Amino acid sequence: MAETHKLSQGAHDRLAAELDDLTTRGRIDIARKIEAARELGDLSENGDYHAAKEEKGKMEGRIQHIERILENAIITEGADDSDAVGFGSIVSIRWPDDDEIERYLVGSIEEQSDDVIVVSPGSPMGEALMGASEGDTVEFESPAGVSKVTVVEIG
């Protein structure tokens, strides 16, 4: 069974637009680059040709990745309960001995935006945050050992 991917409507729309762009303009641009490199001559020593072929491979990999995500996507409305951390919650946390507050979105990396850090609900920190309420301190295993964070705000 294929893995399902929870996405907000906005992330789904961004991925669909990226897929459309890659399968139309992206493929045309790569084909032009490969053709222009072929015209330069000997392909065995043609750096432009090899770079264009590598770029094509990476682009096709991204296309396949997006297609798999969209085929198995479940559109979420965000967190179900604003009193507890859930999938789609934006959580403000404070690390011990640090006055700075960091904002995390508990969800898929495809939800990435500039103003929040994405943490997977399946990661140690994400699992610890799931179900937590404002004021709770949660513990989780990190590369440095056991870490603690306090939930300052959910919203």
Image (cartoon, grey):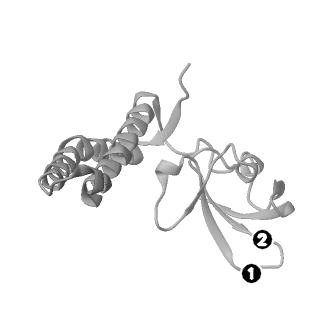
Q: Secondary structure at mark 1?
A: loop
The residue where tag 1 is placed is: 99
Q: Secondary structure at mark 2?
A: loop
Residue 134 locus on image (x, y percent): 74, 59
Classify residue 107 as left or right of residue 75: right
Q: Residues within 10 Å of mark 1 (few under 14, many from 20)?
A: few
Residue 55: x %, y % from top left:
33, 52
* Quadrant (top left/top right/bottom left/bottom right) for the C terminus: bottom right
Image mark count? 2
Q: Are marks 1 and 2 in contact (CB under 8 Å)?
A: no
Residue at x-position 48% and y-position 56%:
112
Q: Residues within 10 Å of mark 2 (few under 14, many from 20)?
A: some
Mark number, residue 95:
2
In the image, taking residue 51 as reference, residue 87 lies left or right, namely right
User: In which quadrant of the rendered image does the N terminus lie?
Assistant: top right
Q: Residue at x 84, y 64 (%)?
A: 144
Residue 96 screen position, x and y as percent = 83, 73
Residue projecting furthest to the top: 1
In the image, residue 54 sits, relative to residue 4, either above or below, namely below
Q: Tell me the kind of residue under disc 1.
A: Asp
Q: As drawn, which residue projects farthest toward the right? A: 146
In the rendering, at what x and y percent does residue 41 appear?
Answer: 15, 54
Foreground: 36 or 142?
36
Residue placed at 13% from the left, 55% from the top? Answer: 36
Q: Which mark is residue 63?
A: none
Q: Is residue 44 above or below residue 115?
A: above
Residue type, label 2? Trp
Q: Quadrant of residue 19?
A: top left
Q: CA distance from mark 1 to mark 2?
A: 8 Å
Q: Nearer the viewer, residue 26 or 94?
A: 26
